[in-house]
Amino acid sequence: MDDTRTHLEARRHCRSLCLALEGLEGTELARLARWGGRLADVLTDGGRLLAAGNGGSAAQAQHLTAELVGRYREERPAYSALSLHAETSSVTAIGNDYGFEEVFARQVAAHGRAGDLLMLLSTSGRSPNLLAAAAAARARGLDVWALTGPAPNPLARAADDAVCVDAPTTATVQEAHLVAVHLLCAYFDASLPELRAPAERTRPALDGVPRSGLRPTVLGGAS
């Protein structure tokens, strides 16, 4: 093994991740804050988050739903969040009967209700089964969010809103997606009335928007 080459590759990997996170911090925190506020509105009103991805992105999606059903940091109620790829019997039955492209779309048709949210994760933004899920969700009145790799890509265009990580490798995009998932959970918790600081609960709104800045009513377009 060429240790020098291995160390150089490791340094490049670390530097690539640092640059991706700098981009996330510089351009996407406000978007993730809006998502956190919207997610809090939907879930506390009895709605649901559906999530899906393939491979490593499936693991990231399942990480997100676990944080919502369980907890991120502070103790709070459980909220409804389902990872569609984790429904192994449904995935294999649908894949066998209808084809792999339909494994998520058919589940969205079964579980999604108008006003629910669908989170789709893809490093390429080109997975046919996620694009089919996005179309099924929008047809049923769900809002669609995407975590993808570099824009432009088809999934970002198909979603109502997207965080697109500008990084050169799949590994780095997935690593940045995990940070984005944790940030979304932090903003979600900060938007819950029971977890807000006492001063935040009583502080007056400014021009009709809470001073926390976490609950605008309109999401921006896909980046």
Image (tube, rainbow, N blue to C red):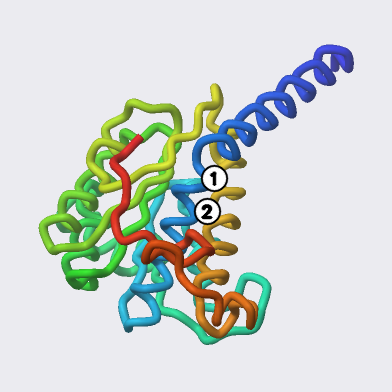
Q: CA distance from mark 2 to mark 1?
A: 7 Å
Q: Which percent across, then down, holds residue 54?
A: 41, 47
Q: Residue at x 75, y 19 (%)?
A: 9
| Quarter of the image where the N terminus is located | top right
Q: Quadrant of the C terminus?
A: top left
Q: Is residue 60 above or below residue 79?
A: above
Which of the two labelled residues, at mark 2 and mark 1, occupies the earlier sequence position? 2
Mark 1 lies on residue:
177
Residue 20 vertical placement versus 161 (above, below): above
Looking at the image, do the residues carrying marks 2 and 1 touch, with CB atoms under 8 Å apart? yes
Which residue carries the number 2 mark? Answer: 60
Locate residue 172, reporting x and y percent: 60, 33
Q: Is residue 66 visible?
A: no
- Corner quadrant of residue 164: top left
Residue that appears at 51% across and 77% down: 192
**Residue 163 to residue 9: above or below:** below
